[in-house]
Image (cartoon, helix red, strand yellow):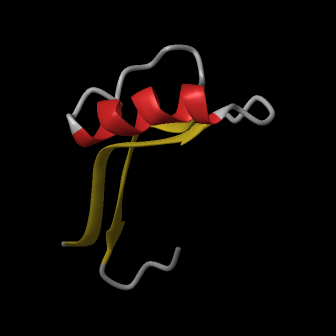
Amino acid sequence: MAVIEFENVRKAYRRQWGRGSLRDAIPQLFGRVAGRGGKDDGSLLWALDGVSFEVNEGETL
């Protein structure tokens, strides 16, 4: 019996390439608020992509 299940887990970190200007930051902020900030434009570092596992009763992780 699975006590913990992870299916197709993904985790990404946004890379920061130095300091940006306020002129660059404002459109990015409004894009995130409007729901357009999730695209992978090459600035994402994928730590996990499609990881699945389960821990059964009595097992340790």
* Residue 3 drawn at (x, y percent): 25, 76
* Residue sticking out furthest to the front: 23
Q: Residue at x 30, y 81 (%)?
A: 57
Q: Residue at x 58, y 37 (%)?
A: 14
* Residue 43 drawn at (x, y percent): 60, 23
Displayed quadrant of residue 13? top right
Question: Would you place residue 13 above or below residue 60 in this image?
Answer: above
Asked whether 15 or 8 is in front, the reply is 15
Quadrant where the N terminus is found in the figure: bottom left
* Residue 45 drawn at (x, y percent): 61, 31
Displayed quadrant of residue 19? top right
Relative horizontal placement of residue 15, taking residue 51 as reference (left or right): right
* Residue sticking out furthest to the top: 41
Asked whether 10 or 50 is in front, the reply is 10
Q: Residue at x 57, y 15 (%)?
A: 42
* Residue sticking out furthest to the bottom: 58
